[in-house]
Amino acid sequence: MSKVLVVDTNRQPLDPVHPGRARQLLSQGKAAVLRAVPFTLILKTACPEAQPQPLRLKLDPGSKTTGLVLLNDETGEVVFAAELQHRSQAIKSALAERRASRRFRRQRQTRYRQPRWRNRRRAAGWLSPSRESRLANILTWVRRLRQFAPVAALALELMQFDPQRLEQATRSGEEYRPGTLAGAEMREYLLEKWQHTCASCGARHLPLQITPIQFPASGGTNQVENLTMACDACQRARGTQELPVFLATRPDLLKRLLALARVPCKDIPAVNVIRKVLYECLQSSGLPLECGSGGRTAWNRTARQLPQTPWLDAANVGASTPEVLLLKQVRVLQIKATGHGSRQMCSQLAYGFPIGHHLPREQGKPVRGHRQRQKRYFGFQTGDMVRVVIPVGRSKYAGTYVTRITVRANGNFKFRLAGQDISCKYWYCQMIQHSDGYQYTFKQYVNPVQFPGPYRKQERAKSPCLARQTLRG
């Protein structure tokens, strides 16, 4: 079970405690809640003589999701686990939309300045906005976890795979000498390139095998461009047939598959650049930094018979991974980066015009396309996590809710309940945590090695209690 982070009154990190111990400290008045997510307590006394057990923060950066794990190397216990979902695709889409709007605006016969693009020079170490967002998200959570937990060492998956070395790889001669670790590098590259799906049928969440497009007996090579991933059913159905013969009845799929085989994985350069910059930033922190490859991570995870998830990949980064990982009932924090709002002060139509400039007034008020500059009203802003307490008799939605709010200048805030917008006054809201640009959810994890039989039933269970009932049955 994930533990609760604790700091003393001087904000010095202490050993994480069991949730039961955390409730006891709160009920006795010895501690208070410092932060809701990640849930952190602050003691009302100082502990200068405390010597907490050192923890290792492990990172597995990815193009879409990054795994973060706090691990005790001595006991193998996972103290904290999280999966950070990036918003790089949203940033790229927003920049493309802005670029198209500006280009359309310059092409119209209106008075507008000429485009200036030669007057800008990129500084050394420049990163694209989407990559910079990934890096900033990871560094933010590294800083937070170091602030609330006794982190004494770091581990980073530095290189997922080397594309140049894989493109020159062959299956003859010295390829078999490095052992199973070199094969894991090739497999991780192909899984990332084909997005963990079967190239023939598109099946997911199934064991996949490496299969050549053109067999070596027919003159095919064993380079990456000639390798795909296939499930067991497609592998048996194909047999020794060549791919054009096997997909003769599906020419569109064959054409798309051959085109994708020649295209390198697009996420590889972005991920490798981020990991190199992240390595330099973590190295400057002064903590011992261990680096590992994606093949080592996959080999560690497979040896411990664990499924592939971002946080489990992070737990298996590096050669210092304990032989036994204690993963019993770990609560995995799902973190989704949402940003801190938009700087766009004018909402636009698809043609680049401001919203509301062509619409009539509604009930005596003009339709506003320009946003207000003020973000905070009555001490709240959109995205704050609050506790809404609506008394009985004031609304049919009377009760207590912990949710995020959308503020309004008139004091009528809104929150969502079962897919419906509910309105409430601002004095019914109690602040829990200010908006920090992230959304949080939790999911429960049960080790499939410990419960190999009913794992699939248990994975569909809605609560831990129902999961235990399923196990007993």
Image (cartoon, rainbow, N blue to C red):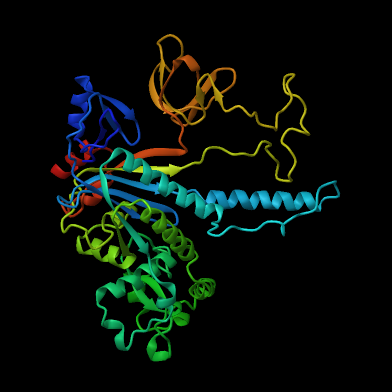
- Image quadrant in which the C terminus is located: top left
Asked whether the viewer can see residue 473, the reply is no
Res. 33 image quadrant = top left
- Vertical arrangement, residue 55 with respect to residue 226, above or below: above
- Vertical arrangement, residue 271 with respect to residue 463, above or below: below
| Residue 370 screen position, x and y as percent | 69, 32
- Image quadrant in which the N terminus is located: top left
Name the one closer to the observer, 448 or 127: 127
| Residue 431 screen position, x and y as percent | 42, 23
Name the one closer to the observer, 130 or 386: 130
| Residue 273 screen position, x and y as percent | 46, 62
Res. 396 image quadrant = top left
| Residue 303 screen position, x and y as percent | 20, 64
Q: Is residue 17 found left or right of 131 in the rendered image?
A: left
Q: Residue at x 59, y 17 (%)?
A: 410
Q: Is residue 445 found left or right of 112 in the rendered image?
A: left
Res. 80 image quadrant = top left
Q: Residue at x 26, y 58 (%)?
A: 316
Q: Is residue 437 found left or right of 299 in the rendered image?
A: right
- Vertical arrangement, residue 84 with respect to residue 342, above or below: below
Name the one closer to the observer, 120 or 216: 120
- Vertical arrangement, residue 434 with respect to residue 27, above or below: below
Q: Is residue 284 found left or right of 348 in the rendered image?
A: left
Q: Residue at x 20, y 31 (%)?
A: 47
